[in-house]
């Protein structure tokens, strides 16, 4: 739905709630009074109608994305409603030196409940629509390691975007206090790292996502190795420093890289210094036919040595790496 259509819908819904709530509140207190013939009540309804829309615009209630609503959005509703009711109370006091305190208190509660409820209903409908629409591909049963903020963010994004091909069915966390809880209808299971393999097999897991960005390199590497040992494809979320610097989002799921398994920081080579030692020089590589020696030869050839001499016991292996290098970089 476009922003214009969404704003129009929310304004119409709020208008109906705001205008009639004060009549409902007054009727609850005085059911025998003809509320629509009460000019003072009608003036109050018009005042709160105008005041509400002014404060709603000020607090941006019609521009918020309610499917991602949280406490902050609810706070904005309470502020807009409270100021609107206060404004009506002031107008009533100026006109009649009287304030319909009980009616305004009921009106305030109705506004918060109905306006907040309308936003919650919107969020629930959107969530259901995203979650249960049928994607083209079959969703993979996914286990998320870590039920903290990062893990819950990942689960929420996956549930709202089934086109990614993941269906979160389980959290695994070592916090016993979270055991048995449901987060976005996904169950949290207490488990130590050594139990991951068994938990995954018991729940027919097809994909594992490690969502604990605060782990050290060594801890992360050990956990990823355990997950990969289960034979299930494992993915991770970015490191906490990359998230904090804004390079990536916490929900950017990525495949495991070799450096993720090092258990230490990746060594950054000074390519300029290496080039100074190799470019234009005559280089001798011993054991050049072996797996390590041949890879060293490949790497050295990239720096343009004057001459690369290959030494090794195996005539065939030396011949193969020699042919490979001649083909890739020439004589």
Image (cartoon, rainbow, N blue to C red):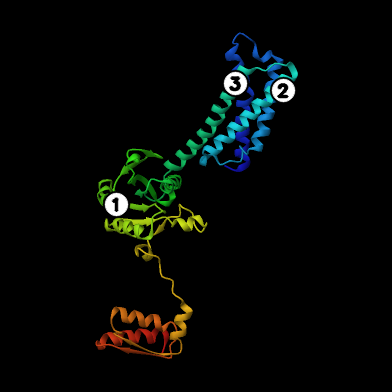
In percent of width and height, residue 270 lies at 46, 76
Residue 121, position as x, y percentages in the image: 50, 33
Q: Is residue 153 above or below residue 10?
A: below
In this view of the protein, can residue 140 be seen by the observer? no
Residue under numbered circle 2: 91
| Image coords of residue 276 (percent x, y) | 47, 84
Quarter placement of the C terminus = bottom left
Nearest to the observer: residue 20 or residue 294: 294
Residue positioned most to the top: 32
Alpha carbon separation for disc pair 2 and 1: 64 Å
Sequence order check, earlier mark of 3 and 1: 3
First in sequence, mark 2 or 3: give its number: 2
Residue beneath disc 3: 105
Is residue 270 left or right of 5 when viewed as pictured? left
Contact flag, marks 3 and 1 (Cβ < 8 Å): no
Residue matched to label 1 = 193
The residue positioned 63% from the left and 33% from the top of the image is 11
Q: Quadrant of the N terminus?
A: top right
Secondary structure at numbered mark 1: helix
User: Does residue 179 appear to the left or right of 61 in the view shown?
Assistant: left
Q: Nearer the viewer, residue 255 or 266?
A: 266
């Amino acid at each position: 739905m476009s922003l214009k259509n969404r704003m129009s819908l929310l304004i119409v819904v709020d208008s109906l709630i705001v205008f009639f709530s004060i009549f409902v509140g007054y009727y609850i207190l005085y059911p025998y009074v003809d509320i629509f013939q009460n000019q003072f009540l009608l003036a109050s309804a018009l005042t709160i109608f105008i005041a509400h829309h002014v404060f709603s615009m000020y607090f941006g209630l019609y521009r918020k994305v309610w499917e991602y609503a949280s406490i902050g959005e609810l706070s904005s509703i309470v502020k807009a409603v409270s100021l609107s009711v206060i404004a009506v109370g002031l107008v009533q006091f100026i006109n009649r030196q009287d304030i319909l305190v009980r009616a305004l208190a009921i009106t305030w509660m109705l506004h918060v409940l109905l306006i907040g409820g309308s936003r919650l209903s919107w969020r629930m409908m959107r969530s259901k629509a995203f979650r249960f629409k049928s994607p083209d591909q079959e969703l993979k049963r996914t286990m998320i390691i870590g039920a903290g903020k990062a893990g819950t963010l990942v689960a929420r994004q996956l549930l709202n975007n089934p086109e990614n091909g993941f269906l979160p069915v389980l959290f695994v966390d070592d916090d016993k206090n979270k055991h048995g809880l449901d987060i976005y209808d996904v169950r949290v299971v207490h488990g130590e790292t050594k139990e991951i393999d068994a938990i995954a097999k018991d729940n027919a897991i097809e994909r594992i996502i490690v969502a604990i960005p605060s782990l050290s390199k060594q801890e992360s590497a050990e956990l990823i190795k355990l997950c990969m040992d289960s034979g299930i494809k494992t993915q991770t979320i970015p490191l906490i420093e990359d998230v904090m610097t804004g390079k990536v989002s916490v929900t950017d799921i990525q495949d495991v890289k070799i450096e993720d398994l090092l258990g230490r920081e990746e060594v950054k080579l000074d390519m300029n210094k290496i080039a100074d030692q190799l470019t234009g020089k005559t280089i001798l590589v011993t054991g050049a036919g072996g797996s390590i020696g041949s890879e060293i030869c490949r790497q050295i050839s990239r720096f343009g040595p004057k001459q690369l001499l290959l030494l090794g016991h195996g005539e065939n292996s030396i011949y193969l790496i020699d042919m490979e290098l001649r083909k890739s970089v020439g004589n």
